[in-house]
Amino acid sequence: MKRASILLLSHLTRQNPKTLTPLLSRNYLSSNITTNNLKSCTKTNGLINKPHQFQANPSRNSGTLVGTTPQISSRQKKIKEKSQLEEAFESAATVEGMLEAFKDMEACFDERELGLALLKVGLKLDQQGEDPEKALTFATRALRVLDIGDEKPSFLVAMALQLMGSVSYSLKRFNDSLGYLNRAKRMLGRLEEEGATAVEDIRPVLHAVLLELSNVKTAMGRREEAIHNLKKCLEIKEMTMDKGSKELGVANRELAEAYVAVLNFNEALPFGLKALDIHKSGLGDYSVEVAYDRKLLGVIYSGLEEHDKALEQNELSQKVLKSWGLRSELLHAEIDAANMQIALGKYDEAINTLKGVVQQTEKDGGNRALVFISMAKALCNLEKIVDAKRCLEIALGILDKKETASPVEVAEAYSEIAMLYENMNEFETAISLLKRTQSMLEKLPQEQHSEGSVSARIGWLLLLTGKVTQAIPYLESAAEMLKESYGPKHFGIGYVYNNLGAAYLELDRPQSAAQMFAVAKDIMDAALGPHHTDSIEAYQNLSKAYGAMGSYTLAIEFQQRAIDAWESHGPSAHDVLMEARRIREQLKTKARDASTNQLPTKALPLPQSCPSGRNEETYIMTSLSARVKQP
C-alpha cells in the first residue's frame, strides 16, 4: 500500500508541483489513474486562491513619483509572504518538511484557508503509516474546515472522509471507519449522478474508498461483503487501465485470493485464470507474476479436488521460482506439492519430497513445522500412527514459541494438527488444541471466520464424544460468526445447523431440532441445489425430527422428497435409495399405529453408539464446519 501511495504522489508532483493537489489514500493501488480533478476545485478553496501579481505602473499609481522605487504596502507584503509559504509547502519533499512549512503557514493563514493543506499533510502521514494519531488530527481538522454543512456533495469533503476512514482503520476503529467510508461512497455517487465532477476524476477516489471498505470489512470478519467491494474495485480498474496491464492481472489475482479465503473455489477459478492469461501475454511464461498466479491456481484446483491439475500448476510455478532464486516462495510451493501428492494418494512420493524440503529449513523455523505437519499427514494415511504423532510433537514444539509473533499462521497450523488428531481418534487432544486455537483467534477480529470454523469443529467433536449439552453453545456461536463472515446462505453454515439439529434431537427436543434442520435445508438448497447429497440428507433429517414429534404426515412428505432426489442420482445411489424407502415404510407403519392407538409418539429410538442420534451417521468435518454424512 505504501508503494502505491509513493507512486501516486510522484505522479501528482510531476503533474503540477505548484498546485496543492492532495494525494489519494495509501490504499489506492494504481498510479495509472490521474487526479486532475482538484484543479476544478481550486478557485474557491483556501490555499489554491493565488493572489494577483502586483503590477507596478508609475503612470497609474498616484502613490509614487516617476523615477522612484514603488513602495509595497503591508497588505501586499502579506500576500507575498503567503505566496512564499505556499511555495515552501509545495516544494517540501518529506513529511518533516511539510510539517515544518505548515507550522509557518499557521501563523499567516486562518483555519478556513488551511483546509487543503491539512488534507494533504493528513494524506502524507497516512501514507507513511507511522503516526496514525497525528494523521487523525490533521484529517479531523481538514474535514471540519471543508465540510461546511452544505447539502451539496463536495469532492474535497469526500476525499477528507476517505482519509478519516483510512486513518480510523489504521487505529482499529472499524465502526468509525465504516461510517466515514460509506458517507464518502454516497457522496461520490451523488457527484457522479449530478455530473458536478468529471467521472475520470471521481473513479480514483471511489476506488480508494471501495478498497478501504474491503479492508475494513475483512478486518471485521465480514468477508463476503468485502469481496463485493473488491469486485467493484476491479471493475473500476477494467474501465481505466489497459487490458494487458500487469496491475490489472494483480487485481484479478487478489480477487481470486479473496474467494479462496471464503472457500469459494468455483468463483475464484475464472479470476485466477484471467490473471494468468494477462501476465503470460504481457510478461511471458517465466515472469514472477506468472509463477504467483500458477501457485494460486494450484490451491484453487486443490480446493476443487482436481489434484492432478493442481500439481501441474504447482510444478510449473516451481520452475519459475527456482529460476528467479526465490527460495522462500519455492519452499512453500514444494510443501504445497507434497500436500497435493498426499491428496492423490502418493504418500511415499510426498514423504520423499518433504525429506528434501526439511533440509532447507531452519531448526526452529515456521516452515519446518509445516513440513512436519505434512509429513504426519502422509504417515497417518500410511497408518504409521506412532511416527505421525512424533512429527506432530516436533511441529507443536516449534509453533509454541511463535504464538505471539505469528498468531494467525500458528492458529492455522494448530487447526490442521487438530484435524490429524481427529483422524487418529485422539478426540480429547484435538478438542484441547482447538480451544487453544480459539483463544488466540478471539483476539483477532479479522479472523472471525476462522474462529467460527474452529468453534464449529469443537462443537462437532463434543457432539461426537457424547457431550451434547457442551456442544450446543459452540455450534450456536459458530453459526452467528460464520453468518457475519460469509452471509446467511453459505453452505458451511448449513452443516452447523445440521449438527445443531442433531444435538437437539439427541436431547429429545424434536421441535428445536426441526427448526434447525429446516434452516439447514434452506441453506443447502440455495448453496448446493436440492439434489446435492447434503441437501437430500437435510430432508431426511427433517423427516426424522417430525417423526420424533409424531407428525408423521410431514415426516413422510420430507422422506418422499429425499427418495425423489436420490432417484435422480441413478445406480450409484442404489443402497441409500433402498434405505430411504425402508425408512418411509417404517414411518407409514408408525403413522397407522398412531392413528389406531391415539397415543402420543415419542422420539424414534437412537443408537447408543452415535451421540448425534442419527441412524448410522458419521460426521466428516470440512475446514469450514461440520458436515453430516449418511452411508
Image (tube, rainbow, N blue to C red):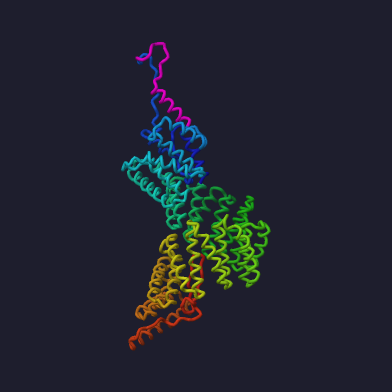
* Image point (40%, 17%), residue name: 71
* Image point (36%, 34%), residue name: 44
- Inspect the magenta stretch and tell me whether residue 76 lies in it: yes
- Inspect the magenta stretch and tell me whether residue 8 lies in it: no
Disc count in the image?
Answer: 0
Residue 207 visible (yes or no): no
Position of residue 198 relative to residue 291, above or below, is above
Between 136 and 555, which is closer to the camera in this rendering?
136
Classify residue 36 by image quadrant.
top left
Q: Position of residue 443 (x, y in %)?
A: 50, 57
Classify residue 516 by image quadrant.
bottom left
Q: Position of residue 568 (x, y in %)?
A: 43, 74
Left or right position of 429 against 536: right
Position of residue 464 relative to residue 55, above or below, is below
Q: Position of residue 481 (x, y in %)?
A: 44, 62
Position of residue 386 relative to residue 193, above or below, is below
Considering every residue shown, the one lying at the far bottom of the view is 596
Tell me which segment is drawn in magenta.
62-88
Residue 520 visible (yes or no): yes
